[in-house]
Every structure is written in structure tokens, then in C-alpha cells.
Image: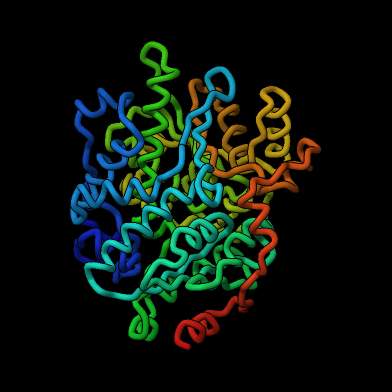
Amino acid sequence: MKFVSVNGGSGATTFDQVILQSIASDGGLYVPESTPRLTPEFLGKLHSQSLESIGLKITSLFLEEIPSNDLSKIIERAWNFPIPLTRLENGLYLLELFHGPTLAFKDVGARFMAEALSFFLAQHHRHITILVATSGDTGSAVAHGFFNTPHIDVFILYPSGKVSRLQEQQMTTLGGNIRALEVDGTFDDCQRLVKQALVDPDINRSRTLTSANSINLARLLPQMTYYAWGIAQWQKNFRRDNEVPMVVVPSGNFGNLTAAVYTKWIGVSINKLVAATNANDVVPQYFSTGQYAPKPSIQTLSNAMDVGNPGNFVRLQYLYKNDIEAMRNDISAVSITDQQTVEEIRRTYEHTGRIIDPHTAVGVAAARQFGLRPSIVAATAHPAKFPEVIKKAIGIEMPLPLSLKSVLKKRKQSVTIPNNYQELKHLLLS
């Protein structure tokens, strides 16, 4: 399997170069040169497969440089937590992606990338610096996934005052090889700064840089596994007749939605895909008007999705050859307000006794709008990470898991920088 830039200005390359470079030499994001397919035989027995066997089968389609035995060990170490599919109500299911160390779906991709990158670094005998922009959970997942990993330094850029205290504590209290940079700006500013650094020749002469954002394909591709695993669980435990479920993905930077699209394209039985956004509705507006018009991000209760210029959307445009009608055949998009988010948390609690976080609530509200059942919603974070929103919605003080209680007691370690690329460059070169 080879990988090419969406911009078409660089040659095909291998996965080990993709994970090390993150962005192609022409500034574009990497995508697979072609879309492989799972065999009908494997798809026919998907319901009987384990998470690990599905992960090995799917990642093997793309990661030909890692021998099967090594890849199996990477998966076993990275995904040592459950990813259950649970019934919320009749025809509506939650794929619980928040049982990893930082209680968010990004643990899946970050931990896999850390293990895979370590494998390649050991082969190349190299030291590497990772840059990450985060609007919430990416930073904590990457920080914990790469903490104390040999030969790796991590710089995490996050918008000051625009992440929850719990999210901030998770990414700013580790120290060691993890450095947190608090940027006076938005997530889009942080993402822009990271992209500038990745292609800066001065920095690249001093450091080997890559990113652990979903702009790095090594973060995105592993996420295909949990969609296939969710479908496998649904087929085994809930399917009736020849039903095919709709999959709803709370969406910010659109890496998670892109992974779901690839899962459908490699042959996994998925009906419609729904991109559920908050008030940052650039993609829903694109589906409505045909015009893609990025704009400054708006702060919402579902802060990890506060993205005004989704970095991964160019991958979807490439995949669908900029044909909006072809994209609409597979994907729908809807915007959910903060008021609707709070109302959904309240409604879900009153009708089911379940407490869901604001990002999952955006997905559940979107599923209700479409009304197509069965529907699987990607439950992306543990509700305890958003106690203020939960209390506002249902008046309950959400009890914190032990892992979150302990992180609140630790000392925050961060450096505040202005929204200025030269400041970041100075830090990286010092």
C-alpha cells in the first residue's frame, strides 16, 4: 500500500514515511493511493470476530511494513480496554469509545500511533518531536499515549480558556517529555501554528517533526477498527432480519468521520453516515449550499468539536473527487445547538437513566432528527469530564472516576504563548 498527497504534488510513499512526516512535502495530507476491500469471507463472519482480530485485519490492509506478529502485539498493547456497544433505547445504540486511560475516543488512535511510531523509530534509530493542536481530548490522549516513550518529545498546543479544567489537567500535569503550550487563540490558530512548523525548513533542520493530530494518517486509520467492531457487536447481539445501521459521528476536525467513511468503503455494512456538528457548522452549510466556507470557530459546550476549518475535510473531498452529490449519497450533516445539546442530555437521562457527555449528546440529538433506526452513535467521551455541563442539564454532581480525581490534585505545567508563529518557532529551536 502506497500513500499520496491530496494536493497531488508529491510522489507515493510508504506508511513509515507517512507516520514520520505527517504532512507531504507539498503541504497536503496523506491518503491511501487506493481503497482496499475486506474479503466477503471475512465480512461474512464479522459478527464472530474479536476486536483484536478485526483490528489486525483492517490495519494489515494499510500497514504492510509492520510484520503481522509485531502488528498484533502493537494492537494488544494499545487497546487494552473494552469498547462495548450498548443499547440506549429501541433501535438506538452507543458505541462506547471512552473506556481508555483518558476517557475519550482519541485514546484508540493515539495509543496505536505511539506503539507504531516506537516500532519505526527503533528501526530507524531516530529521535522525533511531535506537535499536537487540541481543542480538548486529543491533547490528553496524546500526552498519556506518548508519556515517557523513548526518543520522543511532545509539544501540545491548546487554546487558552477554551478547554475544560479536567481536559487541561490531563495534558498539563505529566511533565517529562510532554510540554503543554497554552495559546492565546482558538483551536484553528493552534492547528495553523502546527502546520506552519511542520513545513518550516529551519525547524526541520534542527528537529525531526511529525504530528499526532488526525492530520497524521496513523491517528486516523486505527479508528476504522472500532466502527467495524461496533457493527460486529450489533450484528451479533442486536440485528434483526437484513437491517443495516446508520452511524452517527460527533464531528469537529472530521478525522473520526473520515475513518467511518473508509470503514464503509472497505466493505463494512453501514447505511447512511451522519456528521453531527455543534454550532461550528461549516460542513452542514457545505452540504446545504455547495459552498465550503471556513470561518472562525465558536466556543460551545461540546468544546472538542469547536473547529471552524476542519483539517480532515480535504481527505473527504479527495475521496469523493470533489463530487458533492457522491458525498451526499453516503453522508448527511446536521448542526446541533447548545440548547439542543443540554436538552438531549436531560431527555436521555430522564428516559433511560444514562448520563451522556455533550459531544455524545450532539450525536444522539442528530440521530433523533434523522429518525432512521437502527442507529449507532459514537459515544466519544465520558460524561465525568464535563461536570459543569452535566450539572446544568440534569442538576447532578457527576461523580469523578479515580483517574480524574487524581489528576485534579496535580500541578499544572504549561507555557503561555501568544498567537504568533515566531514565538512557537523560537521555542522549538531553543
Q: Nearer the viewer, residue 380 or 315?
A: 380
Query: Looking at the image, which residue is at 32% across and 62% down?
Result: 117
Q: Indicate left or right for 82 with 406 as reference.
A: left
Q: How many numbered callouts? A: 0
Q: Indicate left or right for 406 with 62 as reference.
A: right
- Estimate the x, y position of residue 385 in percent, counting from the top left: 65, 49
Residue 170: image quadrant is bottom right
Query: Looking at the image, which residue is at 19% across and 31% down?
Result: 39
- Estimate the x, y position of residue 222 in percent, counting from the top left: 35, 47
Q: Nearer the viewer, residue 74 or 349?
A: 74
In the image, residue 42 above or below residue 143? above
Query: Looking at the image, which residue is at 54% across and 58% down?
Result: 140
- Farthest residue, direction right: 395
Query: Looking at the image, which residue is at 23% across and 35% down?
Result: 38
In the image, residue 406 above or below residue 176? above
Residue 15: image quadrant is bottom left
Decide if residue 298 is in sight here: no
Residue 135: image quadrant is bottom right
Q: Indicate left or right for 113 with 145 as reference.
A: left
Decide if residue 162 is in sight here: yes
* Colour convention: rainbow
- Estimate the x, y position of residue 223 in percent, counting from the top left: 39, 45
In the image, residue 33 above or below residue 50? below
